[in-house]
Image (cartoon, coloured by chain):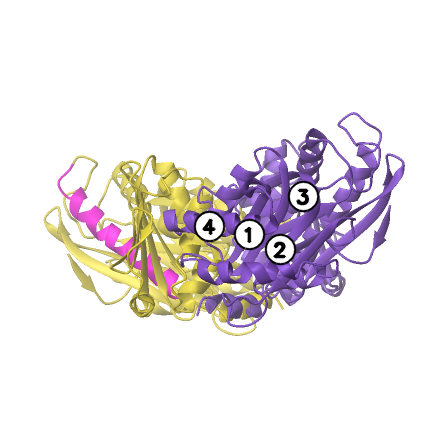
Chain colours: A yellow, B purple
């Protein structure tokens, strides 16, 4: 497997376009991704009880696991917008599909931006002809930019590998700059590939890839109303078809895992106000649920996040957070590391040198690891530090 | 019932003192509360799996529900300090009790401050004689100050009422400035009263009083390792003894409820960086657990908290947070209020005037209320907004 330049345009047979249609005051806010041939498709969506209109519609359109285009807008989430919101989503999907000459069920939609305001569908409707006209092989980077909200920079990634006798490519873009954990700002990821793959294998590969990537940054199902991950596989690499039992699946899965985990890390690093990437690992938990509880609690603790931001080794906050998590462990029988430094062995302080501790938190990436010694289960979560910039951004988002 | 001036010295028969013993660089950091006669006592402590040494010791000393003195230090939490920490707590309790001429089991201890650092017991030991010498009827306010960490101001409250044929008084002080919800900074509250009351009635009254006060600000049992609420009732009002079935209980409970809820509100308002008090009410939930889940999720959402801080009516964040909480409700059948303004009726926007919405968030106290219309259960939580000052304080706490 080789990491290559580019994003969603790296695989064969995809074109894209983007433009400013007027939802945002400035900057592009509407984008289209199109496969020259119908693609096998799979999607994963928010588990929030409140689902935005585009999520509802795309889920219906994905029932046959076939799609050919994705229409995305930023600046308005079309969420908490009731029946009118769903009508608006249906309208733009229908018009875009018709302009592309494909069935409306083969067009998926996604939105991100402010919640609770009516989607200005007329602006999108008016822009669709231009958007379709502009579709090109070079539009990928601009699309990565057009789907941003408060993101600092576009996020894209691509890999090439051999499967079924051919070189195959996976490319992807994402946005998601708000709270990563607990994740109320929308995370959108669009993945394209030219691999020829069966529906079942594609669905399985996407699900399998989520645990080590996007699920590490969206904790406890606490997602926005719009979170969406979509993959389109158009088969244009003309490899021997990858199936659930076939030989190409492993190479595909590896490539996909690299792409999804890479994007997930980019999302955290580009998070609002984030200056440090934090990995929290808990091993030795007695159940998988407790391992997750513990990493979630620690990674979501404002006191832990501000501590890492300030480079201040006030590790008692980690222990207090662990203690409050509900995970079982013996107060006198767990280990704690900061970076590669063992701080507590069996609950007892073994590293008293504050300067060394401070150094462990001085890098761009901070690692907090715990061994609960209560079992064999493990969980990892990625998050960012909490800074004054985060507060500034979020105190004034809508106005 | 009448609200009166003062705090823990308002009831008859209590004295207190405080001084600087050197745990903190400056400011008083050691305090003693003493009842002239042995008192009936009850305590509630953190449910964190990791309990600080003073919590462990005080729980043991409270087994007989009798106590006469409380020794409190700030600047060091004596938490995550292992066996040495417990030894230190025992040592200072024994010496203070001996100096006071009481049994060591009648002395309770509490600590707050940095975690994971050895308690400098020698400084406390050295200061105990002076501390005991200084006990006086006027020491209450200084004690309220000595137990502070990053608190902006001391917190005290007192009420007088008639019970069992006499005027009785309840007074209290508290500290707790860090994260209120989810509450990793220590909350300490000490309540004194001259009511003559049975052990059973006192324990019941304290437990009953917690739900509408301190439990509203410490969510999901996610407390610090040191959280402590202690009440001492010395009987010096010479009322007809209050019992679980007697007539004075109601007046006592009312007084106690006023004191605990008043302190809880003071704790939130004095929270780190807090500029606005936020009350979140969820009614119409199908179970009490779901009502609590929903209020907790909303009150702990950084996006909701920054939104209130910024006075920005981005109410979609509240809905997204509710949707992620796990509470059951119909997306098209719940109501949302900001302040007294109905924003959503049955999930549909009814207040589109942003200026009015902004006004609802412009006051010192913001109220968010939801009716899920899924049942008859209700929960309330109090929290504060999240500001840049909070981040500044917590990025550099230990150094």
Residue A273 in magenta?
no
First to last magenta residue range: A246-271
SS at mark 3 in the image: strand
* The N terminus of chain A sits in image quarter: bottom left
The Cα atoms of the two marked residues, 4 and 1, are separated by 9 Å
- Please name the predominant secondary structure of the magenta segment in the image: helix
SS at mark 1 in the image: helix
**Label 3 and label 4 in one chain:** yes
Judged by depth in the image, the label closer to the viewer, 3 or 4, is: 4
Do residues under tags 4 and 1 come within 8 Å of each other at their CB atoms?
no
| Labels 3 and 4: the sequence-earlier one | 4
Q: Which residue is mark 2?
A: B32
- Quarter occupied by residue B390: bottom right
Q: Position of residue A358 (x, y in %)?
A: 34, 68
| Labels 2 and 1: the sequence-earlier one | 2
Task: Tell me the crowding category of disc 4: few under 14, some 14 to 19, or many 20 or more residues within 10 angstroms, Cα based.
Answer: some
Q: Is residue A223 above or below residue A17?
A: above
Task: Tell me the crowding category of disc 2: few under 14, some 14 to 19, or many 20 or more residues within 10 angstroms, Cα based.
Answer: many
Q: Position of residue B9 (x, y in %)?
A: 75, 54
| Labels 4 and 1: the sequence-earlier one | 4
Residue A69 in sight? yes
Q: Which residue is mark 1?
A: B96
Q: Is residue A288 above or below residue B95?
A: above
């Amino acid at each position: 497997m080789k990491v290559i330049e580019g994003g969603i345009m790296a695989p064969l047979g995809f074109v894209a376009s983007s433009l400013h249609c007027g939802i945002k005051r400035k900057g592009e806010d509407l984008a289209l991704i199109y496969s020259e041939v119908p693609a096998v498709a799979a999607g994963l969506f928010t588990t929030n009880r409140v689902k935005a209109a585009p999520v509802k519609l795309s889920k219906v359109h994905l029932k046959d696991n076939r799609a050919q285009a994705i229409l995305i807008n930023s600046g308005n989430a079309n969420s908490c917008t009731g029946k009118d919101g769903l009508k608006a989503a249906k309208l733009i999907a229908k018009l875009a599909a018709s302009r592309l000459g494909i069935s409306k069920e083969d067009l998926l939609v996604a939105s991100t931006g402010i919640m609770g305001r009516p989607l200005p569908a007329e602006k999108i409707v008016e822009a669709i002809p231009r958007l379709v006209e502009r579709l090109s092989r070079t539009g990928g980077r601009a699309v990565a930019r057009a789907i941003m909200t408060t993101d600092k920079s576009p996020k894209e990634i691509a890999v090439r590998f051999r499967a079924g006798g051919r070189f195959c490519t996976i490319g992807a873009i994402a946005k998601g700059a708000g709270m990563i954990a607990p994740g109320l700002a929308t995370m959108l990821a669009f993945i394209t590939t030219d691999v020829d793959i069966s529906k079942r294998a594609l669905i399985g590969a996407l699900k399998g890839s989520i645990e080590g990537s996007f699920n590490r940054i969206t904790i406890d199902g606490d997602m926005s109303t719009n979170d969406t991950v979509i993959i389109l596989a158009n088969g244009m690499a003309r490899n021997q078809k990858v199936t659930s039992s076939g030989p190409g699946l492993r190479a595909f899965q590896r490539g996909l895992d690299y792409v999804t985990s890479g994007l997930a890390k980019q999302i955290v690093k580009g998070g609002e106000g984030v200056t440090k990437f934090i990995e929290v690992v808990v091993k030795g938990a007695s159940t998988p649920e407790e391992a997750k509880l513990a990493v979630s609690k620690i990674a979501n603790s404002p006191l832990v996040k501000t501590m890492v931001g300030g480079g201040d080794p006030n590790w008692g906050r980690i222990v207090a957070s662990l203690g409050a998590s509900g995970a079982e462990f013996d107060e006198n029988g767990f280990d704690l590391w900061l970076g590669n430094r063992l701080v507590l062995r069996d609950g007892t302080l073994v590293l008293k040198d504050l300067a060394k501790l401070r150094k462990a938190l001085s890098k761009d990436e901070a690692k907090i690891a715990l061994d609960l010694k209560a079992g064999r289960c493990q969980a990892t979560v990625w998050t960012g530090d909490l800074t004054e910039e985060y507060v500034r951004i979020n105190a004034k988002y809508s106005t």
